[in-house]
Image (spheres, grey):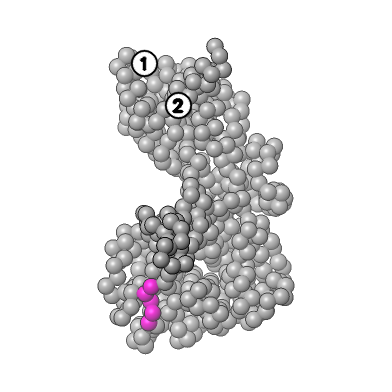
Amino acid sequence: MSQKSVDAHYIAKIKSLQEIEVLLERARQKGLRIIQCHGVFDLLHPGHLRHFREAKAQGDLLVVSITPDRFVNKGPGRPAFPEHLRLESLAALADIDYVVLNDTPDAISAIQKIRPALYVKGSEYANHAADVTGKISEEATAVARNGGNIFYTNDIVFSSSSLLNKYFDSVPKEVAEFLEKFKKRYSADELLEKLDVLSTLKVLVIGDAIVDEYQYTEPLGQSGKGIHMVARCQDKETFLGGSLIIANHVAQFAKEVTLITAIGRDCSYSNFISRNLDPRIAPHYTILEDSQTLVKKRYVIRDGKVLTKLFETYSGQEEPLRHHQTTQIVDFLQKNAKSYDLILTCDFGNGFTNPILIDAISSMPSFVALNAQTNSGNRGFNVVTNYRRADYISLNEPELRLSAHDKTSSLSGLAADICQLLNASSLCVTRGIQGVACYTSSGKLIRIPALATNSVDRIGAGDAFLSLSSLCMAKKFPPIIGGFLGSVAAAMNVQMIGNQEAVKKVQLSKYLIRLMK
């Protein structure tokens, strides 16, 4: 058989979910027994080969479904091999009859299409309680619902992630060196236990509500009647932003979350906010009388996974809170603050906070985490030094330098000054591709490299970091753990466009486990 014929044979084994559903229904009518395996299969190894061989021995047709690239949350540089190469590699194996690219993060939809007589997993999945994702139990239920059973192979177990981490340069040198030292102090199990502990927290999130809209455009070139550029608007996406998405992040980990924010009286996005705000959050909305909820609209060019931002507009939230509105919020804080373990203040400087409210937050007896963001709408005016006190502060480097009015001094010196001024026990400085610097009141500066080797969109990464790190600091975890888990959340966030979804505990746990192997 020629190489061309071999290649055509392999490619013919790769099917869509729609194609495989039809093919397998015909096979079942002929009395053939269908077997399914599912996974990422990023690096094929002897354990996989023996797993497929044993699976095929249980029936007539072996179908392997794989997770698409966009749903692989296994750490920086993963998947090492893109989905089309993973499909081709599996199709080249004689024991496999068909290979299918799934369309969801889990195997449920593939199971519903394939309807296997046996769904085969490795022995490491036999203990459902040990699966941090909880997915194996859901998969077993889906298999049973479709008339099948689950079967566990019992052979050599390897980890693709361990092999990739050990033998391949899947992460930058500085990340590998950091993880090597970090893993000597903490294990994945310890970190997962700490994530579980966060569920005991009662959190109040307070700050500006923002709606982010991405308007995708096609550039047309220079106008024929002027020197300005012209673009054609195509589709658009809308996301929660500001305190709304931060509350959603927090709600994935803490047991009780309350949100205080402001929206416009006739807000055209009110239904969108209601639908997308996590139902576990108790919102308290202050109603703006004469302006709308702030909308940040970004005009972008999208080329595959690459985004190029053209320009951005702000609309809404032009009026500050009125005195009676401020008084109502301050009264709520004074009556209820003691019942919260953490008051997470996300001050975006768009008109929600004012000196009276800032003073009230600074006087709260609870643990206060603070971010005062500098952006195009408030540049230079919204700084953390407007506050008198905070227990934990999270800023990017320009925000820190603006707060200190110092462009050139060392980060550690500036962090020490700000911590002393606000009596904070810790401060984290996010630095984009340079990672994070965590400063403690003891004078120690801990540097954590950026855990994402590439990014789709950086918008929202700081909010994800603030959310996770604040929870950890409120629980008095060592700052290196708070900074590390916040960095994991940020690394996951930059793999999506905008704030398409909150950072979920299950996905973060999976990312963490793969990173620590």
Give, as a three-letter code, the residue at label 2: Ile
Q: Position of residue 351 (x, y in %)?
A: 43, 79
Q: Which mark is residue 14?
A: 2
Q: Position of residue 44 (x, y in %)?
A: 59, 29
Mark 2 burial class by Cα count in 10 Å: few <14, some 14-19, many 20+: many
Q: Magenta stretch: give its range.
A: 315-319
Q: Secondary structure at mark 1?
A: loop
Q: Which image quarter holds the C terminus?
A: top right
Q: CA distance from mark 2 to mark 1?
A: 19 Å
Q: State the residue position of label 1.
A: 32
Identify which residue, 30 or 238, lies in the foreground: 238
**In the displayed structure, would residue 229 be above or below residue 142?**
below
Q: Position of residue 282 (x, y in %)?
A: 35, 66
Q: Which image quarter holds the N terminus?
A: top right
Q: Secondary structure at mark 2?
A: strand
| Residue located at (56% from left, 17% from top) | 3
Q: Quadrant of residue 135?
A: top left
